[in-house]
Image (cartoon, rainbow, N blue to C red):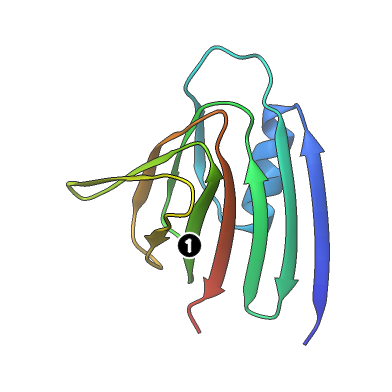
Amino acid sequence: MSTSEQPVGTRDWDTAHRAVADVYFPHELRALDERDEVDLTLRTVELGGVTIGRLTWGAAVSIECDYPGAYEVNVPISGRLHSRRHHDELVSAPGQGTIFTADQPSLITRWTADCQVLGVKFDAE
């Protein structure tokens, strides 16, 4: 089993968007406040079909994603993660996880600016 570690830090929205999409999933990212800069901190380790990462956007954002080919578990270490799937609303606080199902549209309606997440991606295979 091979492992690789990828630390990323940037204040540029496009670079931040691409970095997270490359490691996790393609997604639609929207800023929820009027900040000119993001303050992305991303550190990941890939272990075969599992990616473990620690991520903060440093700005309030929403993310729309279909989680193609993999499951995602996001556990806030700080801040709050608000999400919606179909008509269900969920708010995860530190130590509470949100599970996103492979190949199903999901929406993180608010990733608070102070939210740091431990995110684990599991390939569906």
Asked whether 79 or 55 is in front, the reply is: 79
Q: The residue under label 1 is which amino acid type?
A: Val
Instruction: Work out which quarter of the rendered image holds the N terminus and state it.
Output: bottom right
* Residue at screen point 50% across, 54% down: 75
How many numbered marks are there? 1
In the rendered image, is residue 1 in sight? yes
Q: Which residue lies most toward the bottom here?
A: 1
Asked whether 79 or 39 is in front, the reply is: 79
Asked whether 73 or 125 is in front, the reply is: 73
**Where in the figure is residue 35, as x and y percent of width and height?**
61, 14
Q: Which residue is mark 1?
A: 73
**Where in the figure is residue 22, as x and y percent of width and height?**
68, 54
Q: Is residue 9 left or right of residue 93?
A: right
**Where in the figure is residue 122, as x and y percent of width and height?**
54, 73
Image-quadrant location for residue 44: bottom right
Image-quadrant location for residue 81: top left
Q: Is residue 37 left or right of residue 122?
A: right
* Residue at screen point 59% across, 26% down: 59
Q: Which residue lies most toward the left here?
A: 87
**Label 1: few (<14), some or many (≥20) within 10 Å?**
some
In the rendered image, is residue 68 in sight? no
Q: Vertical placement of 71 versus 30: above or below?
A: below
**Where in the figure is residue 34, as x and y percent of width and height?**
54, 12
Q: Kindly state the secondary structure of the residue where label 1 is placed.
A: strand
Q: Vertical placement of 61 versus 23: above or below?
A: above
* Residue at screen point 48% across, 47% down: 94
